[in-house]
Amino acid sequence: MYGSTNLSEEEAKRMNTTVEDPEKLEAFESRIARGEKIEPQDWMPVEYSKQLIRMIEQHAHSEIVGALPEGTWITRAPNFRRKLALIAKVQDEIGHGQLLYSAAETLGKTREEMLNDLLSGKSKYSNVFNYPALTWADIAVIGFLVDGAAIVNQVINSKGSYGPYCRALERICYEESFHLKQGHDNVVYLATGTKHQRAILQDAINRWYRPLLHFFGPPDKQSAHSEKLMKWKVKLASNDDMRNQFLDQYVPKIWELDITFPDPNLKKNDDGIWEFSDPDWNEFKRVINGDGPCNAERIAVRKFAEEAGRWVRQALMNPSEKYVVPLA
Amino acid sequence: MNTLDPRIKRLSLDPSTEVEKTNSHLITYEVFHQEKRGKHVTHVGIVHASNPEMALVMAKEVFGRRGKTTNLWVVKTSDVYTFGSDDEDMFETTPEKTFRDPAYYKVRDRIEKFQNKQKFEHEQRT
Amino acid sequence: MSNALKDLLYKMADDALIIGHRNSEWTGIGPMLEEDLAFSSMAQDKIGHAQALYKILNEVLGEADADTLAFKREEKQFKCCHFVEQPIGEYDFSIVRQFLFDHAELIRYDILTQSSFQPLAQLAKKVKGEIKYHVMHADTFVKQLGNGTEESKARIQSSLNYAWHLALGIFEKSEFENDLIAENIFVGEDELKKRWLEKIIPVMESANLKVPATDEIKIVYGGRKGFHSEYLKPLLDEMCEVVRTDIDAEW
Ligand SMILES: [Fe+2]
Ligand SMILES: [Fe+2]
């Protein structure tokens, strides 16, 4: 998931023990219950703002780190159409980062603080971007399926309660539909192409299958819940529900191309629930804790961007201008 | 660094570099977008920039790279004045002031009633 | 005449493709998010210009289609200047290159709006606005970095010094120069260079930059005749890597 809302036990406990002004809390909660949005200048519970910052920040990190695996093939895209689409797509992901950092900034954490936390490892990003893009077919699979998974997540989050985050997501979802279309187009060209093209596509699907199942986070029965985050519309759907929605939308679109997933147990049951083999949640944990194939590279590249760009940003800085929190 | 990205390979990065923490911030500009001539200019988001010229250069690609754009405006965030959210109550009764609404003025019923009456009187006379 | 036209279109298209390709290397790792987007858009614009120029070559002058021209030609068939082939370096070089290159582009396209060769005049009218933005972007950066910190001033000046004789290579004449002028297709590289200097010198001055001295012998020529720097061949190998894995496939 782009911004994880899974809580540690300690956090879950804190969520339930932080005392807030009951009157203000009541007004805040009934506003959300009425379906109204919260705006940056509003009173909000400390934990609401904290959890939102954490989630939006992780989402933003996922965008700018997510630009890296696809960036791998920017200089090698095989024709004008693909070259332009890929650059524009990776550019959009950076743009999504820009929009999301801005939304989180309205809650009082600066972009620079968020980037510091990304580089120090204090703040996480989506696990799926710790895997390499080995061949050109990975670009097709990422564009179609990773973005497809991201859209499921983002469309749901855009119904949340925090105004700036919802506005950013609306714009993002619009751009994501381009990502999805160009990804699908790329997948279809490979699937209907030469033997070589079909082979690299099948290979890429085989490698991305598990990371895609991991994308939505651990099964509901294994993850700590917070009723409060649901009530506050920070979290809007369970991991399992989102995963199921994803499988339902995308598996048939791969199968119709006579491409398979590397899981004999993958099937839809009569009750509409998809069944699949255990995707090895230990691997998920290992990768999240830093031991994935590309974790080190991703952070090293972001560190480079930060360091190499520092003199530019510093030269632009005007010490007589004071930073204030952006409005919306 | 062992990487599959030829661009990254050329940068010859060292993963062990210590990055300095950044503590200084560029200021932000609020960005307003006008889609077409004759349309309102609406707020779309912010950019980080050093001055208004730079903010415009940035706003063009952050908010104007798709669809139609006629113009963009940028305003330094600190130059924007707003109501406090506690002041929303000042606007609360406004929707009730129906005498300002066109929909409040409904005379059709009255006209019809009047016409029916006239018709009736006319028929009585003849 | 069509050979002269082809030569002009190839060099313009190849310049645009190669610099667009180079500048796209910054996408995702730029110095700040907003600039990452801006620089990427401009790289896309350049690649788009290349595609449009190859399209004229294909549709009007009977050359192969745009993808074939970009992805399936040999190094020696390219007519780009050495300046665009250089690696992206650090951001100061990339910005200085944009500044020097795009000022020349803007004037070139502006002049071409009057070209007797209609397809090119049409295209020039269409994309002139894009290049105008590229120049606005470059000027804004050069001025701010040139007036910024001690480090940024020194970086911009030294990149300018390094880039100067490479940039002058943009104006290398081909054997068809006189034909292009005589047929009112283009005013020629000497005139372009003259107008270019008139535009960039005031910007450099307002950025507190010293205009490097020109030494005719150091100007880097060769690209327009198919002789390239050591960087073009590897660039093309990389760009064509996927295509070459399955040369007849549709991608
Ligand atoms: Fe995205
Ligand atoms: Fe995307």
Image (cartoon, helix red, strand yellow):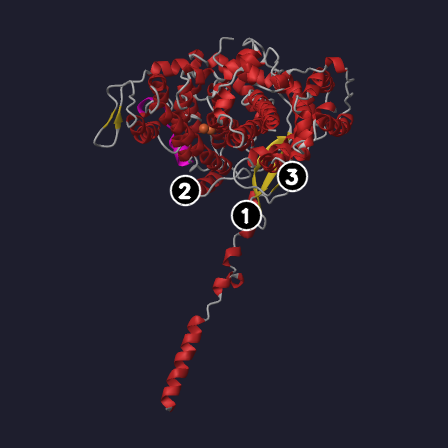
Chain of the residue that carries numbered disc 2 in the rendered image: A
Residue B74 found in image quarter: top right
Horizontal placement of C162 versus A39: left or right?
right
Q: From the image, tell me which residue sits under label 2.
A: A33
Are circles 3 and 1 on residues that touch, CB within 8 Å?
no
Between circles 3 and 2, the one closer to the viewer is 3
Classed neighbour count for the residue bearing mark 2: other residues with Cα under 10 Å, few (<14), some (14–19), many (≥20): some
| C162 versus B69 height, above or below | above
Classed neighbour count for the residue bearing mark 3: other residues with Cα under 10 Å, few (<14), some (14–19), many (≥20): some
Q: Where is residue B80 in the image (x, y as percent from the top left)?
A: 64, 41
In three-dimensional space, the C-alpha distance between marks 3 and 1, rounded to whole angstroms, equals: 24 Å
Helix, strand or loop under label 2:
helix
Q: What's under tag 1, amino acid-wise?
A: Glu
| A271 versus A113 height, above or below | below
Chain of the residue that carries numbered disc 3 in the rendered image: B
Q: What's under tag 3, amino acid-wise?
A: Val
Residue sticking out furthest to the left: A270
Q: From the image, tell me which residue sits under label 3.
A: B75
Horizontal placement of A190 versus C231: left or right?
left
Q: What's under tag 2, amino acid-wise?
A: Ala
Figure quarter occupied by ligand 2: top left
Residue for point 59% across, 25% down:
C3
Judge by depth and name the residue closer to the eye, C166 or C24: C166
On whether disc 2 and disc 1 are found on a single subunit, the reply is no
Horizontal placement of B39 versus A26: left or right?
right
Residue C216 found in image quarter: top right
Helix, strand or loop under label 1:
helix
